[in-house]
Image (tube, helix red, strand yellow):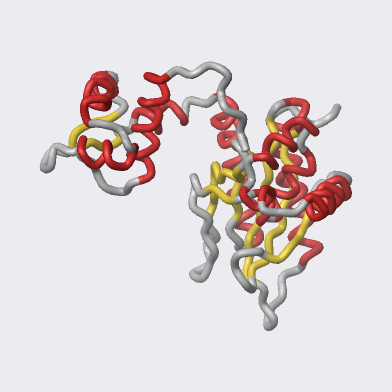
Amino acid sequence: MPQAPQYKVPALEKGLDILEALAADAIPLSLAELASRLNRSSSELFRMLNCLEHRNYIERDSVSGKYLLSLKLYALSHTHSVIDRLTRSAIGPMQELTDSLRESCHLSLLDRGRLLVVSQVESPSPIRLSIEVGARFDPLLTASGRLLLAHSTEPKQAEHLQQSDTWNQLSPTKQKRVRSELQALSKNSSVEAESDSIEGVIDLSTIIGNSPSGLLAALTVTRFRSKKAPSNKASAAKSLLETASKITDSLGLNPS
């Protein structure tokens, strides 16, 4: 679990609580509804709501007058230079990979103990798998998440694991076993595994970038297992590795 801050900043925490509450609900919320959800008084939240509205982080619904998030946080998140640089470098090679394999592929990275999908290219086939951009998963439950954990520096790996719900539910013995599995996986730049959440789905993942550079991501092809027309595993793995190398090279992160 993340450590509690050493110094409390009540006003900031109150504002963040409001933003997180609005993000968690799909519908606008009134002052009274927010107060109820946050277990605070309406008078406590009123001035903070005015401030957030003035700074354009939230806005009022034109019909109900209730509060909802504006697009400002979305815009701020998309100015992150590392992710922007990564997605711009990856989109062309990912499209080529998808056209070649006729399978969807997506790009993900670790963020605060979760696997975050930052880009996706859908297969041109009429029947295909699609992973939504912005989707977040427990990294221990995905092939790409485990691969990224394995290739992270020890401090980063420990930080992400401490924020994983799955990790925190494991006994010390099982945690030790997971660490051993991650250590073994760190010797491989790619992995193929059946999905832990969807039966009949295979994930083929490989690493882009490297942990020391601060840019570490996973490129993944997700496909259905087919008995009638099994995919050429060797060919798919080769194409995935070539695409990952091309993206890593365009980022200037391949060893010379």
- Front one among 78 and 111: 111
Q: Position of residue 251 (x, y in %)?
A: 69, 29
The one nearer the camera, 195 or 64, is 64
- Reply above or below: 114 against 233: above
Q: Quadrant of the image for the N terminus?
A: top right
255 and 145: which one is in front? 145
* Quadrant (top left, top right, bottom left, bottom right) of the C terminus: top right
How many numbered marks, from 0 up?
Answer: 0
To which quarter of the image does residue 34 belong? top left
- The residue drawn where x is 69% and y is 81% is 227
Q: Answer with left or right where residue 177 lies relative to residue 199.
A: right
Q: Nearer the viewer, residue 51 or 254?
A: 51
Extreme-left residue of the structure: 63
Q: Residue at x 39, y 32 (%)?
A: 17
Percent from the top left, x then y, of residue 62? 13, 38
Q: Is residue 128 above or below residue 140?
A: below
Q: Residue at x 56, y 34 (%)?
A: 88
Tell me the residue at 45%/17% (across/down): 9
**Residue 236, percent across and down?**
74, 60
Q: Residue 242: x and y, percent?
A: 76, 47
**Residue 3 image-quadrant placement:** top right
